[in-house]
Structure formats: C-alpha cells, structure tokens
Image: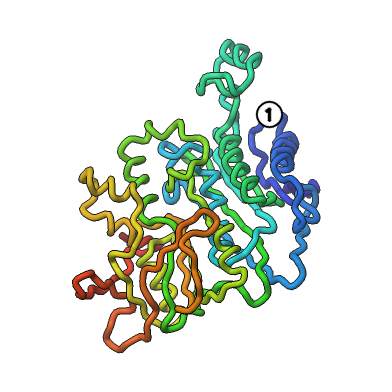
Amino acid sequence: MAATRKSRSALSVSVPPPAPGGERAFIARLRAEAEAHRGRHAGLRLGIGDDCAILRPPAGHDVVVTTDFSLEQVHFRRDWHPPESVGHRCLARGLSDLAAMGATPLGAFLSIALPPELAVAAAETMPKAARRKASGARAASLPGSLKPESWFDRFLAGFLALAEKEHVPLAGGDTAQSPSFDFSGHKQSGLAAADITLVGAVPRGHALLRSAARPGDVIYVTGALGGSAAELLALGRSPQDFAARTLAAAHHPHLYPQPRLAAARRLVAGRRLHAGIDLSDGLSTDLAHICEESGVAAELDTSAIPIHKLARDAQQDGWVPSALSLALHGGEDYELLFTAPRWTKIPRTIAGVSLHPIGEIVKPRRNRPSVILRESDGSQTPLDSGGWEHFRGD
C-alpha cells in the first residue's frame, strides 16, 4: 500500500484513515487480512507490499480487465445493507463481468473512499467504561453494539470471504478519506465509494463477446431472474429484518449475489459458444446490448423465462403487478446470458447452476423492434429496454 509519501506498497493510502495506530497500522492490518485469505495463487507473483503488483497469466491466455463502482446511495444504502453485503457485492459485480467473458480471476484491486467514522471501530467511540468491558472479551461473543469492528472491517470481511471462495487474491488498490465538508466549508456527511478492478485470464481466442451473436443462435440464461429486485423491495420495506444477514447465502440474490464463474469456465471449455453478457442491468437492457453490438435481433419465449421464487412471491403479496416484469427489467441478478449454435449441446445444469433456453437470435428487420416477446398464444410484443441506465434522468 503506497502512501502519499511513497511508503512501498501496491495498496496506497492517499489520506490516512483514523485507524488505531495511524496509517501504517491500518495498512498493516489490511495487508494481514488480505494475505490470510489469499492462499496460494499461481497467477499472482507479487501482491501488497510494493508500488505495483505482478501478475502472470497462464501460457496461451489473453488478459481481461474490468472495473466497477459501488457508490453509496446508488448501489447500496448504509441504513439498509449490512457492511458484509456491501463488500460481497462490490467484488461480485466485477467477478460477474469476468464470468461473462469466460475468464478466470488473476487478482483484485480495491480502491475505497470512506468518511472517517466508517474506518473507526465501534469500541473506539464508545464510553470508556463500555470500552474497558469490551476489551477483555472476544469480539465474536460481544453484542453488536460492543463489537470492536469498524464498518470497513465488516465490509472487508464480506469482500474477502467471497475472494477466498472464488480463489481471488486481493493484490492491491487505494484508500482515501471522503470529503467531510462541501465546497463552501460546511460540514457534511461523507459517503462511501468503492471501485473494484479485476484482472483475469481466458484461453486465447475463446473470450465471449457481446458482438459475436449470430442469427440462428439459441439464447440461454443461468439460474432464475427477478430475485434481486424482489429482495431489494423487501429490504426497503423492512431493512431491520436484514441487519443480521452478515453471511453469504444463495437464497439472498440481492444481498449476496453469486457470480457464475465456475459455470462459465465449464461452459467455455469444449463447447462452441458465441456471445455472452452478465445480467446486471436487467434482461431487457442487457439483451439489447447483445443485439446492438452484434447487429442482430432477438425473440424471447415468455413462458421459458425462469422467474425467481422471490419475484413470484412479490407478485402474490401484491408488491408488484408482475413477477415477469421483475425478471425482465429488475437487474442485479448477475446471472449469465449467452448464445450458442443450435447444434451445441448445452446441459440442463452445470456446476450446480440451471441453464434455460429462452429464445433465439434472428436477423434484424426494418421497422421491427430489436427484441420481441413471443406469447404462448402466438402473439408478439416489443420488449423495450427497461433496466437500469445511469444518467437517464428517471
């Protein structure tokens, strides 16, 4: 972690956070946590400790790189999301991009800006009597209000738990203190922001591209759709019910999305696939990206789209008029959409993940929408992009 004054490291701190012992202690603590979770990784030759990390991709592979922001009040809310979920989601977003290309992670680089209070353990700000009581107990056995853990400690725990599960070393990054004053000097509440950069490797010439779909391809998706949007609805209605959800679980698709790395690697190996994308902005929007980049159109079978149980429950409980709408437009499912020639044998499940054919790629036609929904009665409906898009103004 290279500090502003050039202390040697690949993870730098431009503004020292108010951690116990100052900047050096904070860096040492973060480095120790990262190395404890890293294990052995053939692609990482040198990690935290120098000005740059050194990565070595396997022979015969291309290097792929992705970046993704996680911004407070845009991608998460501190009063809704447990810090462990925020850390998990930060890494999962980037890992899902690698999965969409059929890549294997080589290293992760985390840059994060925090207001001072998020880097300070709760025990440091509590009254002295309570602090003495906490100091003699193991953190795991303390009530939540006495655990000497900062928001960042818990963020990092969620981040590193997923990193260890997916064998991704934290190889470097940057930290800074987010502004506590506005342009006129008035005190304000600083917001947290995290940027994840991931480097991966994919067998040369085998990366799945958005631009490679061809007419006649079958469109597939992994898993089920709409669950993340449905859980977000539940989270907004009653955030206190989710405060204790600090461990990753597959049945929490919004709080703890599961990037489909293993499924993607096994699909790419030995099979002819064409295009790929991860479903981060919603099926309607992400499929439109495939069509635009490939110069094709698509037809989806409405009855074939796999809808998550949470989305169906949201419709049944009257929260939304249509579970299908959540599946089409909800976003943040982080499932994979890919296309393959009709003759390619695609199993029903792979790496424990279900695979569903949901439509086909067709030639574009003049004055015809790029994506069409085909109903069971034979009728067809244009599918407009209804997922997330920054700067759209709505």
Residue under circle 1?
A: 20
Residue 313's image quarter? Answer: top left
Q: Is 46 drawn above or below residue 339 in the view shown? A: above
Q: Position of residue 140 (x, y in %)?
A: 59, 23
Q: Position of residue 276 (x, y in %)?
A: 50, 70
Q: Position of residue 229 (x, y in %)?
A: 36, 51
User: Colour scheme used in the picture?
Assistant: rainbow
Residue in the image at 55% along x and 20% along y? 146
| Amino acid residing under circle 1 | Pro
> Can residue 353 be spotted in the picture?
yes
Residue in the image at 74% along x and 45% along y? 39
Q: Residue furthest bottom?
A: 366
> Can residue 185 be spotted in the picture?
no
Q: Position of residue 238 (x, y in %)?
A: 33, 35
Q: Nearer the viewer, residue 314 or 92?
A: 314
Q: Secondary structure at mark 1?
A: loop
| Mark 1 Cα shell of 10 Å, populated few (<14), some (14-19), many (≥20) | some
Left or right of residue 312: residue 142 = right
Q: Quadrant of the C terminus?
A: bottom left
Residue in the image at 29% along x and 75% along y? 372
Q: Is 239 drawn above or below residue 380 in the view shown? A: above
Q: Is 109 drawn above or below residue 27 in the view shown? A: below
